[in-house]
Amino acid sequence: MITNQDHHDIVHLVAVPSTNPDTKPLGRLIPGMLCHRAIQAGLTPPGQIVLVGDSTCESQAQLLGLQYTSRLTPPLGNPKLLRRRFRQLTRHAKRIICWNDELASMLRGITADRDLISTLPTHAPSHISKNISIRVFEQQDREYWENREHIAEVDTLLPGVLDDIADDLQPIERAMLGMNPDAICIGVLSDRPSDVDARELAFLMGLLNAAGYPLTGIVPNTASHIAAARRHHRGLGGKFQFLVIADPITARLPIFDAMIHPCFDGSGSSMLIERMCENADVPVLRLKQSAREGLSRAPAVAGPIIEHLDALVAEANQRLSTAEPINA
């Protein structure tokens, strides 16, 4: 996809999620959304957009609004192996803006000015050039880079590009997805959709269903253990709806009553994706666990979610009781 030909000397480097379940996860949602919306808002100059990932990430990029110029497929899923090709591709560039911590290794050996928009510094390679300008979104991430003896500045402008995201979301009728119109719709929130464990959401939905709620659980088609989740759903007699939809699930935010965030870590990645949901009026429920990542099978984990669902039901009942009759 060839795009705006202005600013040939600026190169944006970004990786978005792949829909191929057989490849090593690389891309994330937040970097792609920030890149697109920052260019759109004029907060960063346009230029060539180099997309990193397999062919299935191209559709994801389009859904996120990214009009990329070219795509590079990392051998063995390792961005380090793209360094030579990337240097050749950017030999005339004056500035390179890298939107994924995971791609920072591709900036080595390049003489152009380099920026790293760091939202998940724990995923950055161990060696980063001292000459790279690093921008973060949370003090915790700034301290992480300082502990690695790098200077990082907290960006206060870029997070704002997610504040009006609700204006860009298309209304979606639940009936189009075959959803029960009276069900409470729950999804799982993750910057990297492949980190969503469909099986664990199915376990949790079973617990919530036992509490008496009409439920629809939705996972992206890039989630792990989808087959196991469907088996569990059938084993429970299909007492709740369990749907798999195409990524990115964030494009379907209007259908959700709540998003569960099972592994909040305080990073810019976590905070920004929550900010995006909340700005679309979708509440986010954080689950903090000490022993492992993911949604627990223990009934105690359902407690805070049940409290929230109770509040949703009470709010809906209150609206119904105070609504004026149509024929009044």
Image (cartoon, rainbow, N blue to C red):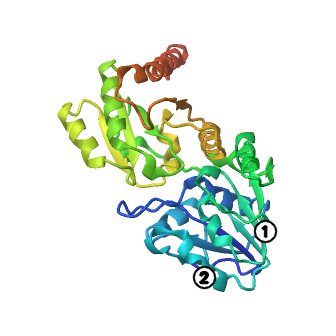
Seen in the picture, residue 65 relative to 47 is either above or below; the reply is: above
Choose between 222 and 138: the one closer to the eye.
Answer: 138
Q: Is residue 298 left or right of residue 278?
A: left
Q: Residues within 10 Å of mark 2 (few under 14, many from 20)?
A: few
Residue name at image x 62 percent, y 79 percent: 86
Which mark is first along the chain, 1 or 2?
1
Give SS at disc 1.
Answer: loop
Seen in the picture, residue 263 relative to 158 is either above or below; the reply is: above
Instruction: Quadrant for the N terminus, please.
Output: bottom right
Quickly name the residue at label 2.
84
Q: What amino acid is labelled 1 in the image?
A: Pro
Residue name at image x 62 percent, y 57 percent: 124
Which circle, 2 or 1, is nearer the viewer? 2
Quickly name the residue at label 1.
45
Q: Position of residue 209 (x, y in %)?
A: 32, 24
Q: What amino acid is labelled 2 in the image?
A: Arg
Q: Position of residue 105 (x, y in %)?
A: 63, 67
Q: Are marks 2 and 1 in contact (CB under 8 Å)?
A: no
Residue 274 appears in view: yes
